[in-house]
Amino acid sequence: METVLTIKFRGVEARILDEMVSSGIFNTKSEAIRSALVKYALDIGLFDRRQLWKKITAHKTRDVSPEKLQREIRKIKDET
């Protein structure tokens, strides 16, 4: 299944998205948006965290490991 969207971001949302990419947490804006969507689905209980993680780790195109993501988030928090 595939869905193609054209989304326009302005203001704070655009700045957040740019920061997520420029800081190196994500390689592309599309990757950042996909990740945020998955996180939201997990937060509201739409998916089971363990089952979803198995599917994500089985997909080899992901370049950001959980450890790298945690390090980058800590780095950003420490800068603010």
Image (spheres, rainbow, N blue to C red):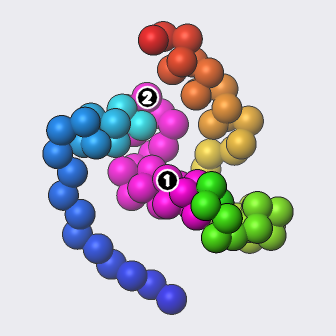
Residue type, numbered disc 2: Ser
Q: Could you say which quadrant of the image residue 58 lies in?
A: bottom right
Q: Image height check: is 77 above or below 42?
A: above
Residue neighbourhood size for the residue with mark 1, other residues' Cα within 10 Å, grouped as few (<14), some (14–19), many (≥20): few
**Residue that label 1 marks:** 36
Q: Image height check: is 13 above or below 49?
A: above
Position of residue 24 in the picture relative to residue 53 (left or right): left
Q: Image height check: is 43 above or below 16?
A: below
**Residue that label 2 marks:** 23
Badge 2 element: loop
Q: Image height check: is 74 above or below 39?
A: above
Position in image of residue 77 (x %, y %)? 54, 18
Residue 76, which numbered label? none
Q: Nearer the viewer, residue 58 or 70?
A: 70
Q: Nearer the viewer, residue 60 or 25?
A: 25
Magenta segment boundaries in residue numbering: 21-41
Position in image of residue 54 (x %, y %)? 80, 66
Position in image of residue 57 (x %, y %)? 75, 61
At 29% from the left edge and 74% from the top edge, which residue is drawn?
5
At 24% from the left edge and 42% from the top edge, which residue is drawn?
14
Q: Nearer the viewer, residue 60 or 71?
A: 71
